[in-house]
Amino acid sequence: MAFLDELKKEAEALREQEQNLTQARAMEVTQSFLLVQSRLRAILLYLQELAKHLNTVSGNMTRSYYIDGFGTVDDFRPERFVVNSDRFNIDEKEFIKMIYLRFSCRTAQEIAIEKNSPALIEMERQYLWQANLKFQCTEFKNEKGHVDRATFSVAKEIPVHIKFSADFEKARIFLSMKNFNGLTVNEFTFDADEVDEKLLDEFARYLAGKPGNFIELGRHQMAIRQKVAVKRASAEAAYVNLDPHVAARLDAGADGEKASGRTGLLGTLKSLLSRN
C-alpha cells in the first residue's frame, strides 16, 4: 500500500498544480478583459464627443478619392457622423463588444464611367461592389444582341465605416477603417495599455485631416515598419524598378497577420466576473 499512497500523493499534487495554473490563467484573462472594457468605454465616450463636434465643423473638411475608370475627385465632404456599439451580457452585466463610427463623404460632381467590353464591365461592377458604392449600370447590346458597352452612374456618396473591436484574452484592440484612405481597408492593432487620451487625440487629428503621427503609433505598427525596412534593405535593387503602387502593396503585405475581432473568452471568465 505504500507505493499506492505515493501515487495518490503525486496525483493530488499534480491536480493541485493544474488547478492553480487554471486559476492563474483565468485571473489573467479576467484582468485582460476588464482592461479592454475600460479602454473600449473610453473610446466610446471620446467618439461620441468627437462625432458631435465633427458634425458641426465637417463643412470645412474635404477628402479626395480616386475612382477607377473616372479619376480623382477632390471635393468629397464628410457628413452625418454617427457612433454606436454592439453589447453583450454576462450575468446581467453589460459589456461592449464593438464600437462603430460611420459617416458619408458626398460630392456635387457627377460620376459617370463607361466600359467597352464584357470583361471590363464585370471588373468595374465588382470594383464598385467591393467598395460599397451604389451605382446604376446601363448596358448596350450590339447587332448580335450581346452586351459590349455599359455606362455606370455612380452615387455621389462614399460610405466610411470605422470599427473598434478586441481580443479580450490578449488585451488587444483592433481598428479597421474602410473607405477612409481611398476605397480600401486600413487596419491597426494596439495593445490595450497603449490606448489613452494621447492616442485618441492623434486618431481624431487623423480623422479630421490634421497634421499628426497617428499611423506611426503602436508597437504592432512599429514592428510592421521594421519588417518593411528589412525587406527593402535586402531587396533594394528590386524595389527601384517597381511601380510605386506595386511596391506599396508589397509593403502592406510585410505583416502576414490581419487584424481580427476575435472575442473568445475562457469558460471560467463568466463565473469570475459574476463575483464582482
Image (cartoon, rainbow, N blue to C red):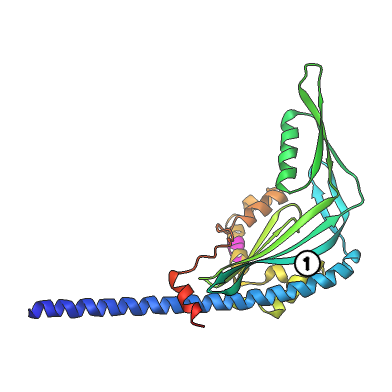
> At 71% across and 50% down in the image, what residue appears?
245
Left or right side of 23 for 73: right
Image location (x, y in percent) of residue 171: 55, 73
What's the magenta region?
A: 226-230
- The residue sitting at the bottom extreme is 276
**Badge 1 is on which residue?**
207
Q: Check the image and report above or below for 243 versus 20.
A: above
Where is 118 relative to 90, above or below?
above
In the rendered image, residue 18, in percent from the top left (x then y), is placed at 32, 76
Is 243 left or right of 96, judged from the image as shown? right
**Amino acid type indicated by mark 1:** Leu
| Residue 36 position within the rendered picture, expressed as x and y whole percent measured from the top left | 59, 75
| Along the line of sight, the residue nearer the viewer: 68 or 103 | 103
**228 part of magenta stretch:** yes
Count of marks overlaid on the render: 1
Residue at (71%, 53%) from the top-left corner?
184
Q: Which SS type dominates the magenta stretch?
A: helix
Q: Position of residue 75 (x, y in %)?
A: 89, 55
> Quick one: label 1, few (<14), some, or many (20+) residues within 10 Å?
some
Q: Quadrant of the N terminus?
A: bottom left
SS under mark 1: helix
Between 183 and 2, the one nearer to me in the picture: 2
Q: Which residue is at 62% across, 78% downward?
A: 38
Name the one closer to the observer, 92 or 144. 92
Residue at x-position 84% and y-position 61%: 78
